[in-house]
Image (cartoon, helix red, strand yellow):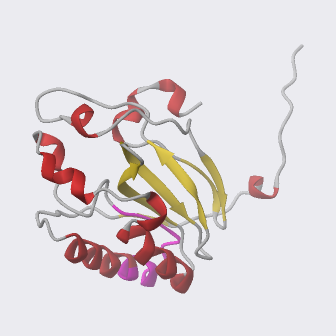
């Protein structure tokens, strides 16, 4: 007979966590206008009781990966300096919510589709870089992004343990392992 050991941690206690996923269009190329729109939606979700609020992937602009245009490289920033991170970090602290923030990241000469985890006290917990990059009609992501070099990430946030994958990552079993 085989027995399985159960791992007990402070996060293993059953509880209810309210999660909001923000779905909206971002047709504007105005990064600040799109961040402002997202801030308003985060405030609305928090007012309705959401504790973890997930904005859309690359919400700072339209989904630009449908074609190959060099101009979009100018919208990438180092993750700690990205305008979305800089503005959502104090908002997470103010509202007491966890915000996983999707960004176009520049690290030296390399570019990534990344997620920065911001805890409910405003702590920048770290960055995850998308591992699996699609390429095909309508998905020219390999033109813009390198495969991530962070490995899959799991963070213990105020409201629970959160593991992340970005879009195409979901099709690969190692993401959930």
The percent position of residue 124, horizontal first and vertical second, equals 58, 65
Residue drawn at x 38%, y 30% as measured from the top left: 132
Direction top: furthest residue: 1
In this picture, residue 40 sits left or right of residue 11: left
From what the image shows, is residue 71 above or below residue 24? Answer: above
In this picture, residue 130 sits left or right of residue 75: right
Viewer-proximal residue among 96 and 50: 96
Residue 111 is a magenta residue: no
Query: Which of the image's four quarters has the N terminus?
Result: top right
Q: Residue 30's image quarter? A: bottom left
Residue drawn at x 58%, y 56% as measured from the top left: 126
Viewer-proximal residue among 114 and 82: 82
* Residues drawn in magenta: 43-55
From what the image shows, is residue 127 above or below residue 60? Answer: above
The percent position of residue 164, horizontal first and vertical second, equals 51, 46
From what the image shows, is residue 124 above or below residue 33? Answer: above
The percent position of residue 119, horizontal first and vertical second, equals 59, 68
The percent position of residue 52, horizontal first and vertical second, equals 51, 66
């Amino acid at each position: 007979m085989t027995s399985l050991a159960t791992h007990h941690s402070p996060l293993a206690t059953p509880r209810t966590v309210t999660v909001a996923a923000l779905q909206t269009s971002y047709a504007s190329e105005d990064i600040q206008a799109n961040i402002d729109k997202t801030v308003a939606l985060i405030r609305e979700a928090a007012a309705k009781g959401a504790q973890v609020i997930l904005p859309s992937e690359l919400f700072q602009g339209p989904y630009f990966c449908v074609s190959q245009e060099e101009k979009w490289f100018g919208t990438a920033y180092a993750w700690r300096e990205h305008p979305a991170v800089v503005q959502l970090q104090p908002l997470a602290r103010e509202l007491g919510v966890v915000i996983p923030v999707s960004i176009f990241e520049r690290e030296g000469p390399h570019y990534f589709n990344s997620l920065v985890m911001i805890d409910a006290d405003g702590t920048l917990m770290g960055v995850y870089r998308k591992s699996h990059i699609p390429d095909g009609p309508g998905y020219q992501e390999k033109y813009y992004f390198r495969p991530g070099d962070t490995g899959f990430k799991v963070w213990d946030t105020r409201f629970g343990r959160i593991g992340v994958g970005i879009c195409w990552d979901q099709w690969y079993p190692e993401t959930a392992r």
